[in-house]
Image: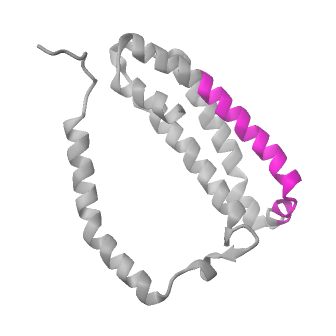
Amino acid sequence: MLIGACWLIIKTEKDLQHFAIKAAQRLVLALTACIVFVSIVKPIVKPDIIERVSSLANIIAIAPMPVLTLGIAVLLFFILKAMPLSGDALNWLPFTLTIGIFATLAHGMVFNLFPYVIPNSLTLVEAASARESLLIIFTGALIVLPFLVGYSIFLYRVFRGKTLPLSYD
């Protein structure tokens, strides 16, 4: 919902944009509360996480993430408080910061799960397909990926700018 509200800040104006800004303010607080809750409860429920961060290399890899996530969330909240800015300046920033929050959360999730795909059950190596199957998938991706990128660029060009009021004239 937070990503959607931040997208509406970019694409709309006036009343709907003000509504999206207020919704994003509440949602960033709710998301931050959920992140803090999970960060406190996760080591209690799964004590082996504490063992994982006991080495210096793991501490260096994971320690900045909670601080960075909280810092981005606080910055996002205060930017949303100041919005809308004159000339609709920086209307893209809340969306970008929200992506940053989820990127740091994904980093933490991968760190907590690695090397397992299914926790304590199936590792990445065990879950991988045969080399030949992976080669076929890779070849297919190389063929399809340029079309996906081109189509995405086309769509963003067609739908760029603010939405306009609906009219049947």
Magenta run includes residue 27: yes
Q: x, y percentage for residue 142?
A: 29, 72
On the rendered structure, is 93 left or right of 34?
left
Q: Magenta stretch: give its range.
A: 26-51
Q: Which residue lies furthest to the top in this view?
A: 15
32 sits to left or right of 46? left
Which colour assignment does the render follow? Answer: one colour
Q: In the rendered view, does 118 fall on the left or right side of 165?
A: right
Above or below, comparing residue 73 to residue 45 in the picture = above
| x 41%, y 15%: residue | 16
Residue lying at 46% horizontally and 32% vertically, measured from the top left: 4
Q: Hey, which quadrant is residue 25 in on the image?
A: top right
- Image-based side of 61 in relation to 91, left or right: right
Based on the picture, tell me whether residue 23 belongs to the magenta stretch. Answer: no
Look at 24% across and 34% down and name the residue there. Answer: 159
Q: In which quarter of the image is the C terminus?
A: top left
Task: Give the answer, above or below, for where 155 lies relative to 160.
Answer: below
Q: Using the rendered image of the protein, determine whether residue 84 is visible from the camera's viewpoint.
A: no
Q: Can residue 168 be seen?
A: yes
Q: Percent from the top left, x then y, of residue 95?
A: 46, 34
**Which is the main secondary structure of the residues drawn in magenta?**
helix
